[in-house]
Amino acid sequence: MAVTTVKKDRKTKRKRSGRMSREKLKGQLEIQSMVWPGLIFLFIFSYLPMYGISIAFKDFNIMSGFIGGDFVGLKYFSQFLTDPKLPLVLKNTIMINLLGLVIGFPAPVILAILITELRGRRFRKLAQTVSYLPHFLSWVIFGGIMLELLASGGIVNKGLNLFRLAEGNMNLMADPNKFYMIFTVISIIKSIGYGSILYISAITSVDQDMYEAAYIDGANRFQKIIYITVPAIMGTIVIMLIFQISNILNTGFEQVLILQNSLNISASETIDTYVYKIGMTQQRYSYATAVGLFKSIIAVVLLWSANKCSNKITGKGLF
């Protein structure tokens, strides 16, 4: 009898849970109608294309498609790791990203703090608008403008000559020794405004009573930034830093390709541009896919490592 009663209770609970889940689903139809299109889009354009990763392990042929082709295992991974150009493209990629990490990452944080500290509302809006504008220009347009400014007869050269920092007209984009820094500065100008939005929203959510209490205690504006603002947005900074570290092998394709030329190629040839040339011009699709998969694996490892270090050092992380 006891066993029969327990079974009946279980069936009753299952029926109730089933009814409750259906009721919840009906009550969330409006919310789900907004979620499902995004999930479908993500599945079609992000998950389905993952099937193409299989060509990294095959001798891909356009005529045979994704299904055909002989299985070659890690052949193309081995080719990439033994490629004589790997040291050069890896060095350029890492150097550009390290400069972006050291110089480019703090820039949006500093800009966000400076903008929120501005007292004039109109000037604050003007500063935000001016800093956001470059982001909405495509790299083709923005890169073209930068190339004109940095040309031998451009404004930058004229300014350097005016202040006697240089003599004569120099083609700055033709010097591989200057490419890393020029690329970093251009990237900062392009992204600093848009990158500061997240930090500005984090700063505006800080409790204003803390600033008022600090003012009563005699703290100046710099002390408020150091002891209130920065600790309050530290969680956001840490998360963005983890993402930045995980992308250390991704310099961005179009911005490098636009600023690249035959004179600076020894400093501007990165993994992204090299893979593009190998995959598209030489039609070695399997090789290019293998390199892309290799980068993704390294990114996951770096993401996990950076998150683990962050959890140990700051107690904050993604997971």
Image: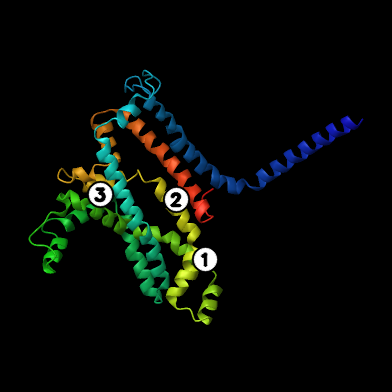
Residue 218 shows up from this direction: yes
Check disc 2 and report its element: helix, strand or loop.
helix
Q: Which residue is mark 1?
A: 205
**Residue contact between numbered discs 3 and 2, judged by CB atoms under 8 Å:** no
Which secondary structure lies at badge 1?
loop
Considering the numbered disc 3 on the image, is that residue within a helix, a strand or a loop?
helix
Contact check, label 2 and label 1, Cβ < 8 Å: no
How many C-alpha atoms fall within 10 Å of the one at disc 3: few (<14), some, or many (≥20)? few
Q: Earlier in the sequence, mark 3 or mark 2?
A: 3
Q: Amino acid at mark 1?
A: Ser
Q: Which residue is drawn at the image coordinates 50% and 58% (left, top)?
A: 235
Q: Amino acid at mark 3?
A: Val
Outermost residue toward the front in this view: 313
Compute the Cα span from label 2 to label 1. Answer: 22 Å
Number of the front mark, 3 or 2: 2
Q: CA distance from mark 3 to mark 2?
A: 29 Å
Q: Which of the two discs, 2 and 1, labels the residue nearer the N terminus? A: 1
* Lower sequence index among marks 3 and 1: 3
Q: Is residue 120 above or below residue 46?
A: below
Closest to the camera, between mark 2 and mark 1, is 2
Check disc 2: other Cα within 10 Å, few if <14, some if 14-19, many if 20+. Answer: many
| Image quadrant in which you'd find residue 86 | top left
Q: How many numbered circles are shown?
A: 3
Estimate the spatial distance between the alpha carbons at disc 3 and disc 1, rounded to whole Å. 36 Å
Quarter of the rendering occupied by the N terminus = top right
Task: Decide which of 223, 134 is in the foreground and name it.
Answer: 223
Q: Quadrant of residue 150?
A: bottom left
Do callouts 3 and 1 mark residues in contact (Cβ within 8 Å)?
A: no
| Residue picked out by circle 2 | 242
